[in-house]
């Protein structure tokens, strides 16, 4: 536990504090949360209760009904579970501009925040600790940026026996007895649409019909995956028409479930049922934590400058190459290209807030091929993913997007536009996956049909 904790200042504990404050900025959950566990331990030592603080602002990038709804759907779970543990809960919904919750720091003995690859500078007059509960192996076990999965994998596997252990129970010695703060917003599922409507955000992007936020829903999805998906994962993870993936990415992004809990559950289920969970754990731990490592050690993780030198050089050489087709950001956003598979993937993103991981790679490669420059392609991918995906603005997302440009990959045969960066084709997708079934599942929305017809005549 100690190697997950960083003390960020030298402040002394105040004499007359009323609680230890945990600010859940990244890991919005009551279970499987190292930061909350540390807050409880610190509070127990000082004879104080714990107050769990969560906020939802209206000024984060691409704030929308989709993202707001998902976060709010997790609040009732969190509130109920904290009450069972004897921990106070304060949820601050900010419909307009960002506001500091009045008085919440003034009575705190210490503040605990989530450690994350990008942590905003904070200056508190009380002790401030950052705790890593996002990764199975703490980020600070690595002191430099790793080149690829093959370099970080042996180090992670060396550490795993120490960290891939069931999460200990949280025991509160001093229960919260006071009322919720005056600014607290009580959230019930039935009132979420009205709360979302009251916020100054983008109301044009509807909530996903496929994902409901919250820890209980994340745990249900995990149980379903273990029962029906894990045994098929290794052989069918790249077949979008017969999904064998967990669907947990949005819940990991918003911290509604712990990657450690997912990993230990998968390992235990595999052992009981004589299954092999290695490929799933590779994606969940090695690949995901490679992404966290990349973002932590890369000042601008959303730039082509973050690529390895071979990728930067080959892309610069081919940046001015003629493209087989050119589309504007607006055309791509509307899913009106000449490629039926790409259109279907974009439609899945627009409607469901996700794209199957294998087709998301193809989706990115084609944006790269159909944009005037590689920088324009990168900006378009980040914009579409962050605006519509429930797992946007995430280390994993940015690493996966930059993978399309050569990050964590190797050189391949040279070709136009891509240089020696890996290429993906529709013909290849047809050989490897059931493209037609997937395309039939995500038809183009009717209001874009005329535009698509015109593009098909051109091409």
Image (cartoon, rainbow, N blue to C red):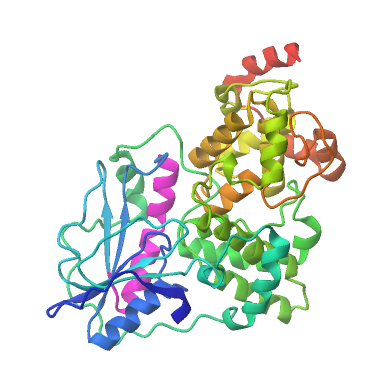
Q: Residue at x 57, y 28 (%)?
A: 333
Looking at the image, residue 412 sits to the left or right of residue 169; the answer is right
Residue 70 is inside the magenta segment: yes
Camera-nearest residue between 176 and 384: 384
Q: Nearer the viewer, residue 449 or 51?
A: 51
Q: Is residue 379 shown left or right of residue 34? A: right
The spot of residue 378 in percent (x, y) is 59, 36
Asked whether residue 395 is drawn in magenta, I would say no
Q: To which quarter of the image does residue 148 belong?
A: bottom right
Quarter-of-image position of residue 10 = bottom left
Q: In which quarter of the image is residue 361?
A: top right
Rendered position, 412 above or below 85? above
Q: How far from the left and from the top, in percent, is residue 431?
A: 87, 41
320 displayed left or right of 56: right
Residue 70, percent across and down? 44, 50
Which contiguous range is marked in magenta? 64-88
Tell me which secondary structure the magenta stretch mostly adopts.
Answer: helix
Looking at this view, is 158 or 448 the one in front?
158
Identified at 20% across, 56% down, the residue is 101
Location of residue 312 with respect to 112 vertically, above or below: above
User: Could you say where residue 218 lies in the image, as x and y percent from the top left?
Assistant: 53, 62
């Amino acid at each position: 536990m100690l190697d997950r904790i960083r003390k960020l200042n030298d402040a002394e504990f105040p004499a007359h504090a009323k609680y230890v404050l945990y600010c859940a900025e990244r890991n919005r959950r009551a279970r499987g949360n190292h930061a909350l566990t540390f807050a409880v331990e610190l509070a127990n030592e000082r004879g104080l209760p714990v107050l769990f603080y969560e906020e939802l602002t209206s000024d984060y990038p691409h704030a929308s009904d989709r993202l707001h709804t998902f976060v709010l759907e997790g609040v009732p779970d969190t509130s109920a579970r904290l009450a069972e543990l004897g921990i106070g809960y304060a949820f601050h919904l900010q419909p307009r501009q960002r506001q500091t919750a009045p008085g919440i720091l003034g009575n705190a003995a210490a503040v605990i925040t989530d450690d994350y690859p990008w942590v905003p500078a904070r200056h508190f007059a009380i002790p401030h600790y950052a705790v890593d509960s996002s990764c199975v192996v703490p980020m600070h076990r690595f002191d430099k940026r790793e080149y690829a999965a093959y370099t970080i994998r042996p180090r992670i596997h060396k550490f795993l026996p120490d960290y891939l252990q069931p999460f200990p129970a949280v025991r509160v010695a001093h229960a919260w007895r006071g009322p919720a703060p005056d600014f607290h917003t009580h959230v019930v599922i039935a009132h979420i649409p009205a709360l979302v409507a009251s916020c100054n955000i983008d109301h044009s992007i509807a909530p996903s019909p496929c994902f409901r936020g919250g820890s209980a829903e994340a745990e249900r999805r995990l149980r379903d995956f273990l029962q029906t998906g894990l045994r098929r994962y290794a052989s069918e993870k790249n077949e979008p028409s017969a999904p064998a993936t967990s669907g947990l990415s949005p819940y990991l992004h918003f911290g509604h479930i712990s990657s450690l809990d997912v990993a230990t559950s998968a390992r235990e289920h595999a052992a009981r049922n004589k299954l092999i969970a290695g490929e799933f754990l590779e994606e969940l731990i090695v690949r995901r934590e490679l992404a966290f490592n990349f973002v932590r050690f890369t000042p601008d993780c959303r730039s082509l400058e973050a690529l390895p030198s071979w990728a930067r050089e080959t892309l610069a050489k081919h940046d001015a190459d003629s493209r087989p087709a050119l589309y504007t950001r607006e055309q791509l956003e509307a899913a009106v290209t000449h490629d039926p598979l790409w259109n279907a993937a974009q439609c899945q993103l627009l409607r469901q807030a996700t794209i199957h991981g294998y087709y998301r790679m193809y989706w990115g490669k084609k944006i790269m091929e159909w944009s005037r420059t590689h920088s324009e392609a990168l900006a378009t991918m980040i914009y579409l993913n962050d605006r519509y995906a429930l797992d946007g603005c995430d280390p994993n997302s940015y690493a996966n997007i930059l993978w399309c440009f050569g990050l964590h990959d190797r050189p391949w045969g040279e070709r136009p536009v891509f240089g020696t960066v890996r290429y993906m084709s529709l013909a290849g997708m047809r050989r490897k996956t059931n493209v037609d079934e997937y395309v039939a599942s995500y038809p183009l929305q009717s209001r874009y049909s005329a535009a698509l017809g015109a593009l098909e005549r051109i091409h």
